[in-house]
Amino acid sequence: MSRVASSLRPSRATLLDIDEGRFRYSVWSNISVGVWADQATLEAAQRVIRVSKWMAERFPGGHSNIVFVLDGAPAPTAEANQVFAKVYDDKFSDLACMGIIIEGTGFWASGMRSLITSQRLHTPGKVRVRVSETVDDLLEWFMPEHTARTGEKLAAQDVRSALLGLRELAARDNGEVPALSGSPPRRG
């Protein structure tokens, strides 16, 4: 990891890697949480693969990933997409399931969903993936899927609180003004 920091309070999360203004990856329980604010480059994607390998070493019973893609973040470069495809491939990944929260709307969000779907369709693997617009929508699917595939039963409210807290930390990294009541932050 490029920078490992102390645990964050109160969510028991630990910062795994950060590229301020681009991404932030943390771990909470056996879930890695990524927040993308800018384009994923080859170097950034390679760092995320190192996060995934670190997770696999520490959680041999299984681990999952939840990613936030912030409104307006550019699509990953072609080279980054090739690296990200490894996340879905059973030869390179032991990821149990992956949830992706696309925080925008309109053509941009539709394009991001299409990119993720295309990548998933063209890569072999058993990793379960779901794309959602909100944390709550994602958790309806994620909680039973994560439990079934990793054996780790977590309280949905605890996971929700951790996700929103980590999302808020990323908002501060990116100079955003956090919104109230758990809704996505807005640019300030």
Image (tube, helix red, strand yellow):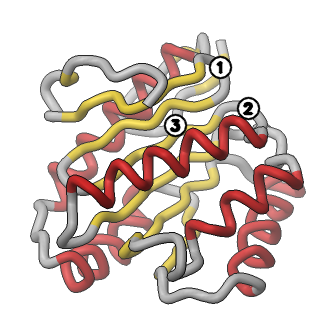
Camera-side mark, 3 or 2: 2
Tell me the kind of residue under disc 2. Answer: Asp
Residue 185 in the image: state x and y as whole percent: 53, 28
Label 1 Cα neighbours within 10 Å, binned few <14 / some 14-19 / many ≥20: some
Helix, strand or loop status at disc 2: loop
Are circles 2 and 1 on residues that touch, CB within 8 Å? yes
Give the position of the C terminus as an image quadrant: top right
Helix, strand or loop status at disc 3: loop
Residue 133 in the image: state x and y as whole percent: 57, 59
Helix, strand or loop status at disc 1: loop
Q: Which residue is mark 3?
A: 184
CA separation in Å, label 3 and label 2: 16 Å
Who comes first in sequence, dot 3 or dot 2?
2
Tell me the kind of residue under disc 3. Answer: Pro
Q: Is residue 142 left or right of residue 128?
A: left
Q: Which residue is mark 1?
A: 21
Q: Nearer the viewer, residue 58 or 146?
A: 58
